[in-house]
Amino acid sequence: MSTSGTSSSPTAPSVPTDFIREIVEGDLASGKHHSVVTRFPPEPNGYLHIGHAKSITLNFGIAAQYGGRCHLRFDDTNPAKEDVEYVDSIQEDVRWLGFDWGEHRYFASDYFDQLHQFAVQLIKSGLAYVDDLSPEQIREFRGTPTEPGRPSPFRDRSVAENLDLFERMRKGEFDEGACVLRTKIDMASPNFNLRDPAIYRIKKASHHRTGDKWCIYPMYDFAHSLSDMIEGITHSICTLEFEDHRPLYDWYLDVLKTPSHPQQVEFARLGLTYTVMSKRLLLQLVREGIVSGWDDPRMPTLSGMRRRGYTPQSIRRFCELIGVSKANSVVDFSLLEHCVREDLNARSQRVMAVLRPLKVVITNYPEGQVEEFEAENNPEDPAAGTRKVPFSREIFIEQDDFAENPPPKYFRLSPGKEIRLKHAYYIRCDEVVKDAAGRVTELRCSYDPQSRGGSTPDGRKVLGTSHWVSAPHALDAEVRLYDHLFGVPDPGAADDFKTVLNPGSLEVLDGCKLEPGLAGAVPGSRFQFLRQGYFCTDAGSTGSHPVFNRTVGLKDTWAKIARK
RNA sequence: UGGGGCGUCGCCAAGCGGUAAGGCAUCGGCCUUUGGAGCCGACAUUCGCAGGUUCGAAUCCUGCCGCCCCAGCCA
């Protein structure tokens, strides 16, 4: 291993933290490569999700760490499924995550001419043939795990005939499915991928970049290895399910005697509890309107997480913490939340917001009087400064912060008890006002003028501290509380994932009372609503109708105690 | 009954023949004008199982067991 041998070079390795970095460092140390070139190769047929973030972080991270580069390459070889909407969103998401491909943005479709030439070369070498078998027949001829496949009757066509047929395929003389170009490898291979895989099929679909120039399109394996080679990729990092394809990946490069031969390395894709990651399922959630769109804050998509208020830093940190290995794994969602809180705790402004308001009248506070208190913006960061918060005779506190019959260990307001209003005064509950139905509608309390600022000369202790908002100054807002979209840790295992949706994944609260300073918060702004959680101004929030999304709640020790 | 992978604490994951890192979660305690944050402590005599090699094995060998992926003209 080469941890110190080249320590004086600019690509000096540090301690590798995963097996892929070990491989890269080994190749750099042995001189196999002098620089590293990786690529992130999404198919533009869906939005990027947190699983892609793992791959992006790995590929761009390795490139940055070893002084190389990482390409963004769209694997757009199937015009039937792909769309520009997706290439746009993918670029936006990669940038948002914090990575830069510089000039290196490519499309597999940029290489269609070269790929076509490689296919012709394969035919000329007698290594590819046009097969007229139907898709069903091809499947039958392919054999089974225990039986070898049988050669297609068209396998031994002459080079000239294959050249002619392939050209006619290109010209559009045949219908979709009529024939396909296959490589001649080994119909008896125990690896299905080598049983004469198709490399070109007819698709009379308009391509989002090449339009109607082509009606034949290369298949993934063929296009991918050659695209990697064309770009000078050194390490082609992909997920485990492509391990079986590696012999094929290598075969194209060997047989075509290409000037370089990238190395494919596979790692385990990310699994996350309480979420589904398959594009098919995510598409279904969007198409069937189960969520509001690809950027619904409950989606594991990067656009959803962005709208939810997750930061790029926290997602990158998460990808760093989960590691990279070849063991199939499902990471606890709580680790992601931990990363989000860790980041937001350090830098989000604290603010007071009452989500479920309960009116409190401070009977001994002068009517019409307004005071302003100085409130710290972030106890973790004194440099964040302070702000003024208005206080008056009528305020709102959280309904949960009052209990007429307090359970054990309840450190909040109840009849006759005293609490502190954050940054303001101590108040004692003197009277509980109820409506005809017996519901508490208002509290009448008295404050201790001596407690201004939150402490008293006698140094007496209070039960706890509550957040509050001055009623006449409050900003009304809508607040959306999010929870897991699914109610079970492994929704992917359900026969129908729709049966395991979490009915409480979205709770919309109206008439929430926010600190007036929140007026005009621009979409995307993040705050910590004191004692409750981190919230983000929604993308659709306006001055006349402010909307905040709960990114993640604060850890709730009381909830744990109350459960017992 | 074919091929390719993987099995270390509830979840990730280090470990690469010298006697089980770390993070999340969990459970205690301290502290606190957020029941937040922070701090302290507990948390695998054992590495899927069984043999073997060795002074010594999670690490090497053999066998077994379990899980994942592969029969698209998808990627």
Image: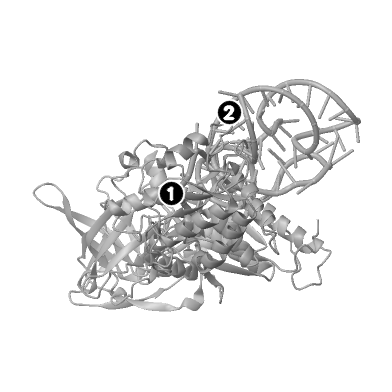
Residue A537, percent from left and from top: 33, 69
Left or right: residue A41 compared with residue A550:
right
Q: In front here: A161 or A226?
A: A161
The amino acid beneath tag 2 is Thr
Q: Quadrant of the C terminus of chain A?
A: top left
Among the 4 quarters of the image, the one containing residue A88:
bottom left
Residue at 31% from the left image edge and 59% from the top image edge: A293
Residue A456 in view of the camera: no
**A384 lies above or below A298:** below
Binning the other alpha carbons within 10 Å of mark 2 as few (below 14), some (14 to 19) or many (20 upward) gives few
Left or right: residue A403 compared with residue A203:
left
**A54 lies above or below A425:** above
Q: Quadrant of the N terminus of chain A?
A: bottom right
Label 1 marks which chain's residue?
Answer: A
Residue A236, percent from left and from top: 62, 58
The amino acid beneath tag 1 is Ser
Residue A279, percent from left and from top: 41, 52
Which residue is denoted by mark 1 in the rendering? A278
Among the 4 quarters of the image, the one containing residue B35:
bottom left
Q: Residue furthest left?
A: A436
**A265 lies above or below A421:** above
Which residue is denoted by mark 2 in the rendering? A146
Q: Is tag 2's residue or tag 1's residue first in the polypeptide sequence?
A: 2
Q: Secondary structure at mark 2?
A: loop
Q: Secondary structure at mark 1?
A: loop
Label 2 marks which chain's residue?
Answer: A
Residue A168 in view of the camera: yes
Q: In front here: A306 or A5?
A: A5
Number of numbered discs on residues: 2
Residue A156, percent from left and from top: 58, 44
Q: CA distance from mark 2 to mark 1?
A: 30 Å
